[in-house]
Image (tube, helix red, strand yellow):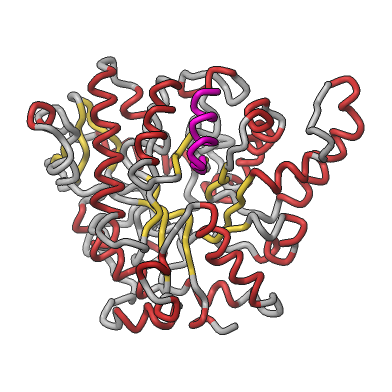
Amino acid sequence: MKAEDLILVSVDDHIVEPPDMFDNVLAPEWKSRAPRTVRKADGSDVWVFEGAQLPNIGLNAVVGRPPEEYGMEPTAYEQMRPGCYDVHERVRDMNANGVLASLCFPSYPGFSGNLFARQEDKELARVMLQAYNDWHIDEWCGAYPGRFIPLSLPAIWDAELAAEEVRRVSRKGCHAVSFSQDPQPLGFPSLHSEHWFPFWEACADTGTVVCIHIGSGAGMHFTSPDAPVDVMITTTPISIVNCAADLLWSEALKKYPVKVALSEGGIGWIPYFLERADYVFEHHHQWTHQDFGGKRPSEVFRERILTCFIDDAAGVKNRHDVGIDTIMWECDYPHSDTTWPEAPERLMSYLEGVPDDEIDKMTHENAMREFRLDSFDHIPREKCTAGALRAQSPDVDVAPRSVRGGLPPTFEEGKPVTTADVTKQIMSAFSTPAE
């Protein structure tokens, strides 16, 4: 297979929410309380909700910048590619990258909607969460049928309400919901608690995939303030292993036939994880009383857990040990790990020798099946290839574009960036109050 013949469905991208997102989805009596964007005196844009200023609007939304300008700094809309927040420009950027369809995680509400969960007024929380989901499904994804996989946010503060919302959005055609890799640091019961059973049951009943993104618990893990930020960037994807273990040994996964995607977690570590899980079961189940119904843990994992990778030659090489029917590809637009605008070429660099039918499974078939994506109902298959999509938007400028101009570098030149530097940069979003 050639790069231009690939059909690419990305199961992990991100939205930078536009300022007008609530205009058409909220009743008039709620609009004055909706989150809103504010332009600060320092020129940055922030979201404000119930008097609280939120972290910057486009955390690490650096796609299209030269690598030396990557960072986490507070960002104004005009400093980002319009494709970050404009759905029409997003589709053009997808075309330029040869990507057929995309699943997009949120930005300012948090991966599991914890912004709304923190509100004391739970009716306000419910209204805003549902409005967010309606905007995402109807306006963002609905603008281009077949080009997006809808993803809802959960009412994580109330398991029964979370179940109701899963069922509500399922009727709208949304079969994916974001959730936390570790709810405890957010103030909720762990993944092992029966508290979540109504939520799991609703997901199983509706065929809704639970998407668990790295950093969706207490956030990114920093080993120490003076550690180079490269430590965090290196280990964060692999840290999803703790969530994978929680899920695999949980009662919920045994009780409810639900599918869970480990979003942006990579796949290269999975063969050893499954080998270890089987070893633990064989050596310890007599006293730990684990029971997988006559199956090995690795078998259950491959039946129920969906795995996701951006750039993972080791994982692709060991794809059968991972589970070829579980693997899905990601682009991570617009973050710094993204392979935009060279995703097809990057993929093909380590797909040499992989049979075409296996390439198809990893690049689009598994995702289309699990998320019930109907792209071919809207677009002829021959027009869904990377080459055909690029031909639709030949005028998209994919050359790196500097946005910093005459501003000083974000970090001290020539000095390794530490996690403390990054934390300081993120917190600088609050140094100038929003009006």
Q: Quadrant of residue 27?
A: top left
Residue 375 spot, x, y in % from top left: 41, 65
Q: Main secondary structure of the magenta part?
A: helix
Residue 357 spot, x, y in % from top left: 65, 73
* Viewer-nearest residue: 385 or 347: 385
Magenta span contains residue 100:
no
Residue at position x 40%, y 34% in the image: 167
Quarter of the image where the C terminus is located = top left
* Viewer-nearest residue: 255 or 343: 255
Q: Is residue 41 left or right of residue 322?
A: left
Q: Is residue 85 left or right of residue 270?
A: left
Vertical relation: 376 (above or below) 428: below
* Viewer-nearest residue: 141 or 59: 141
Residue 148 spot, x, y in % from top left: 37, 58
Magenta span contains residue 206:
yes
Vertical relation: 411 (above or below) 204: below
* Count of residue discs: 0
Quarter of the image where the N terminus is located = bottom right
Residue at position x 21%, y 38% in the image: 47
User: Is residue 360 shown to the viewer in this render?
Assistant: yes
Q: Quadrant of residue 295?
A: top right
Q: Magenta segment, which residues?
A: 197-210
User: Is residue 404 shown to the viewer in this render?
Assistant: no
Q: Is residue 421 left or right of residue 347?
A: left
Residue at position x 18%, y 40% in the image: 25
Vertical relation: 129 (above or below) 8: above
Residue 30 spot, x, y in % from top left: 13, 28
